[in-house]
Amino acid sequence: MRTRSAFLLAAFLLFVTAFPVWAQHPAPHMPAPHMMAPRANQGHIPPPPPMPSAHRIERFEGGAINSTQHVDHNIWYGHDLPNDPRFHLDHPFPHGHFPHPGPGFRYNIVRIDPVHHWFWLPGGYYFEVAPWDWFLCSDWCWDCGDDFVIYDDPDHPGWYLLYNVHTGIYVHVQYMGM
């Protein structure tokens, strides 16, 4: 009887100590069963923006326009012009290139520093949101799940685009390393 009790206790302790390992977030390239379907862009992740991208403004019937940075029907709207001086970097990619950009990788944010406009992805990768774009994303639910995709910015060397799969809005970010 003692052997059986000891075995059950050992099995229980093994389960309790191993559970956090099983509950860890999957690698970014692995689809997670708990991912919510995107709500923006007709329910799917858009392809990367074209190169060079055009500064498009979404126009609606009746004359209304939407010039906010967003993606709709796989068209990237509101992207800044390639010669915009805010994006000029004397040394693009000072911390190297982010290794996993593109629509095949969906991320959750593991930490956010709203004062410095920094956020961290699993694995310790961190980014800084462009100061002029912070107002577009400051109210995002940063820790709600796998809601973000990072794209290379085709027009501004050294910059990336952080796309929110539920709002359809994107902001410019710089990779700061690990």
Image (cartoon, helix red, strand yellow):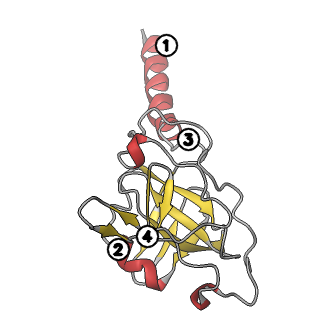
- At label 2, counting other C-alpha atoms closer than 10 Å, the crowd grade (few under 14, some 14-19, many 20 or more) is few
The relative height of residue 12 versus residue 81 in the rendered view (above or below) is above
Measure the C-alpha gap from mark 2 to mark 1: 57 Å
Q: Where is residue 160 in the image (x, y as percent from the top left)?
A: 61, 68
Q: Is mark 2 on a helix, strand or loop?
A: loop
Q: Is mark 1 on a helix, strand or loop?
A: helix
What number is the disc on residue 3?
A: 1
Q: Is residue 142 toward the left or the right of residue 126 in the image? A: left
> Which quarter of the image is occupied by the N terminus?
top left
| Residue type, label 2 | Ser
Q: Which residue is drawn at 35% across and 79% down?
A: 135
The relative height of residue 175 versus residue 76 in the rendered view (above or below) is below
What number is the disc on residue 26?
A: 3
What number is the disc on residue 138?
A: 2
Measure the C-alpha gap from mark 3 to mark 2: 26 Å
Measure the C-alpha gap from mark 4 to mark 2: 10 Å
Q: Nearer the viewer, residue 15 or 43?
A: 43
